[in-house]
Image (spheres, helix red, strand yellow):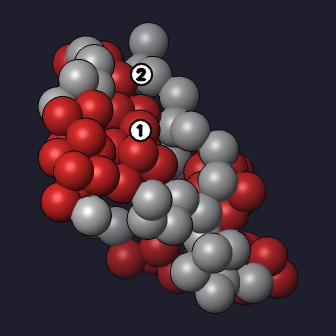
Amino acid sequence: MRQLCHWKCRNLLRLDCRADDVAGSLWDLAKASGVPTSLADLGLRRDDLGEAATRAAAEIRTNPRTFTAGDIEHLLLDAFDGNRPKPIL
């Protein structure tokens, strides 16, 4: 068991983290660690994403980009399916 833990830790340290892909790098770390990487794995239902997006859009006051509830819902759909976040271009 100790050997397996050592192997996992060494491999986690090899993850590439680029400044333009921090979210993707964190997703890679989560995947390599074996933790859930989708909102579905955490028990959220696809039917709840629209309401979650609407609530988030109403609550977020400061963000470097302009966005709509539809933008957030698209982000949540990707997260629900467990898709790796895309780098910011």
Left or right: where 28 falls relative to 73: left
Residue at x-position 79% and y-position 76%? 46
* Residue placed most toward the observer, 15 or 25: 15
Residue 47, horizontal then vertical, whole percent? 82, 82
* Residue placed most toward the observer, 75 or 25: 25
- Marked residue nearer the N-terminal end (2 or 1): 1
Which quadrant would residue 50 be assigned to in this image? Answer: bottom right
Q: CA distance from mark 2 to mark 1?
A: 16 Å
- Placement of the N terminus among the 4 image quadrants: bottom left
- Placement of the C terminus among the 4 image quadrants: top left
Residue at x-position 65% and y-position 84%? 44
Q: Are marks 2 and 1 in contact (CB under 8 Å)?
A: no
Q: Which mark is residue 88?
A: 2
Left or right: where 42 falls relative to 51: left
* Residue placed most toward the observer, 1 or 36: 1
Q: Which residue is mark 1?
A: 28
Q: Amino acid at mark 1?
A: Asp
Between marks 2 and 1 in the image, the one whose residue lies nearer the viewer: 1
Residue 79, horizontal then vertical, whole percent? 60, 56
